Image (tube, helix red, strand yellow):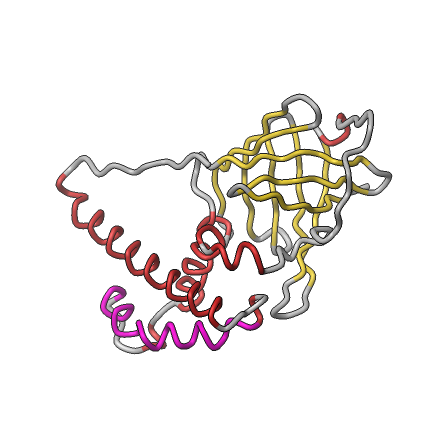
Amino acid sequence: MKKTQKYFLLPLFLVGAVGQIYAQDIYDRMSRKLCKCVEKEQVKDPSGMGYCFEKLLVNNLEELKDYYNAQTMSDLNMEEIGNKIGAKMIKECDYVIDNFPSGIVGSQERVTKQQNLNCDDLKNGDFYYLNNRPETGIIDTTFVTISNNMFLERMKNGRTYSLLNIKWEEDCKFSLEFKESNDPIKKEVSSPGDIYEYEVLTNGEKSFFLNVFWRERTHQFELFKLK
């Protein structure tokens, strides 16, 4: 996937740049440690990560407090810290990528590509896919609007979004280029310019099945038609 780079050209921004690099080092180290712990403990889904995450926080608490100028643990934004570490795990921890369920409904299905497939009705319209959160058992709905070159996702009852550009190719294949998001997880996982490749497998009465290609792996999911 393409990555964008940020360059700090003026001396005024050097302090901020150093701070960002330092924070990046913290989260890189913490995500690697968490990855090793979940592999050692043979954790198979996010609901079993409590022990490893708590151990990680205890061992790195003073460093986090120094970086955030926090006096106590309660002064730290644990949700933000968890999102940053979790995003790096999703992208960089091979054990998590290979063993954790994606949570997207339909990801366990294995379908073959439909013959004489037509994807015209996917190029403009409203759709949704479902996420099963193993730590709570709650099913989350992500709504998708595709219009011309726009691919818009809306999560958490419309409170958060992700905006991507869509580019269609032959044989019902398309790519998504990440633009922006205010979703606490998705904005950490993706950077502007990241590219995701997709292939439509089936076009049924109620849904599509698609493959998404990421980090030399293929993941399948079901995209439902919104009528």
Farthest residue to the top: give it: 170
Residue 39 x %, y %: 48, 66
Q: Can residue 184 be seen in this view?
A: no
Would residue 165 be found to the left or right of residue 222 on screen? left
The correct choice, above or below, for 50 with respect to 20 in the image is below
Range drawn in magenta: 48-68
Instruction: Pick whichever, 88 or 165, lies toward us.
Output: 88
Which residue is drawn at the image coordinates 50% and 50% (left, top)?
Answer: 186
The correct choice, above or below, for 122 with respect to 160 in the image is above
Which residue is drawn at the image coordinates 69% and 61% (left, top)?
Answer: 139
Residue 137 x %, y %: 68, 68
Q: Does residue 54 show up magenta in the picture?
A: yes
Image quadrant where residue 98 sits: bottom right
Would residue 208 be found to the left or right of residue 182 on screen? right
Main SS category, magenta section? helix
Residue 171 x %, y %: 70, 24
Image quadrant where residue 135 sits: bottom right
Would residue 130 be found to the left or right of residue 182 on screen? right
Residue 145 x %, y %: 66, 38
Which residue is drawn at the image coordinates 62% and 59% (left, top)?
Answer: 101
